[in-house]
Amino acid sequence: MTKIRKLACVLTKYSYGQKDYGLSPEYNAIYKPLKKKFKNLKLYNSLKSKNINKNNLDLINFCKKNKPDFLFFSVYNFEFYLETLNYLRKKLGIKLINWSSDDSWRFDQHSKIISNHFDVMVTTSSDAYNYYKKNNKKSILTSWGCPDDWFKIPKKSAKCQRDIIFIGQKYFDREKIVKHLRKTFKVDCYGRGWENKSLKDNQVPNFLRNSKISLNFSKSRGNKKQTKARVFEICGSGSLCVSENSPELRSFYSNSEVISFDNTKQLIYIIRNYLKNSAQRDKVVFKANKKTKKKYSYSEIQNCIIFKIKKFKFTEKKNQIIKKTLLSLFIKYIFLFFMRITYNILIIFIKKKLVIKIVRRFFFELEWRMRGEKTYTKLGACNAFFNSF
């Protein structure tokens, strides 16, 4: 069995690297439970610097100083060059693990491309896991969960302060659905874009617990649906989870533990039923809470991941060669040229923050399709362009 003598985490401490947004899901899911198991666990805050070059050099220096034998990543986007990952593996002899939590929608554009530069890929997508297995890649299939300190004994319906709550961003079709619900029910929404600001990390479990019904929406980019962390957080905090259906939801909870819907009409019927039948609501809540505490606490999930990693046999492998050619450099600068022109035109009419978002999304979608793994290297155009902001 492989020994893990010294482990370190490489992930963003705060959501999107912004302290105002509170602790990131990855910090709650990976670092906090592993800190209980590995007392000497170190954290490299992966989005602490907007300068990508500095970020990579700082990570290398962090590893030279702390000398971990395993690094547990949760790569967000462009923050680390593939050349850096190769250096950590080859020169420093570190085994690299990556938690890819959004594989339901970004497997092809991200995890699949960078996976050859990691020793183990941890995924929440069964499709991604099957791909790795088929291609002889060490992989672990897991799920999101609930932070250990969020677990509460549920309140009965009669003692809850509010009927319905939704915590999350105002995007996709969420506004439309909530607007329709508000014709009949009182729905309190918290998060970016809603009338109530985002809750702090330590506020979320209490707000959920004091709500009879907590909503979860499953849509992600490209209209794909995924089983989000919020499902587990709602159940662990002690509220009734009413969730939009997703392909893997029933792999975790039965229909007597999490109530699912496919459309707004069905959602209205479900809400009306469970607000009227408090005893039925309470029965579902307590059952889901018990299961979540037993199977889906982050301590339990990370214990399973570490156990499986220890069972892997790691052999010396050659690093993936990233060829730097005149053609690849030429393509990079062609991309940069058109990105700069697009940016300069749009900035005349649109605010800078939105321009950056538009240009980045458009050219990233082009680059990963045309250039594959070079998107995530020093030859990448998107990371070079946005390193200047």
Image (tube, rainbow, N blue to C red):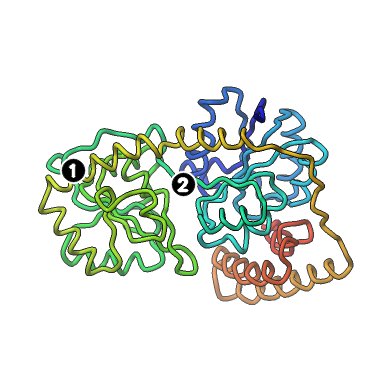
Residue at 26% x, 44% y is 239
Instruction: Specify the label residue 118 is tagged with.
Output: none
Which amino acid does the dot numbered 2 rest on?
A: Ser
Give the secondary structure at mark 1.
helix
Q: Quadrant of the C terminus?
A: bottom right
Snapshot quadrant of residue 250:
bottom left
Q: Position of residue 150 (x, y in %)?
A: 36, 36
Q: Position of residue 360 (x, y in %)?
A: 62, 66
User: Total marks drawn?
Assistant: 2
At label 1, counting other C-alpha atoms closer than 10 Å, the crowd grade (few under 14, some 14-19, many 20 or more) is: some
Residue at image mark 1: 283
| Vertical order, 178 against 49 (above or below) | below
Task: Give whichever of 273, 291 is nearer the camera.
Answer: 291
Residue at 36% x, 51% y is 197
Which amino acid does the dot numbered 1 rest on?
A: Lys
| Vertical order, 168 against 69 (above or below) | below
Give the secondary structure at mark 2.
loop
Would residue 346 appear left or right of 380 to someone viewing this image?
left
Which numbered disc, 1 or 2, marks the residue that appears first in the sequence?
2
The Cα atoms of the two marked residues, 1 and 2, are separated by 24 Å
Q: Quadrant of the N terminus?
A: top right
Snapshot quadrant of residue 2:
top right
Would residue 17 appear left or right of 201 to someone viewing this image?
right
Residue at 60% x, 58% y is 131
Instruction: Specify the label residue 143 is tagged with.
Output: 2
| Vertical order, 316 against 263 (above or below) | above
Q: Position of residue 263 (x, y in %)?
A: 28, 68
Task: Give whichever of 251, 285 is nearer the camera.
Answer: 251
| Vertical order, 110 against 334 (above or below) | above
Task: Give whichever of 45, 345 is nearer the camera.
Answer: 45
Q: Position of residue 251 (x, y in %)?
A: 39, 51
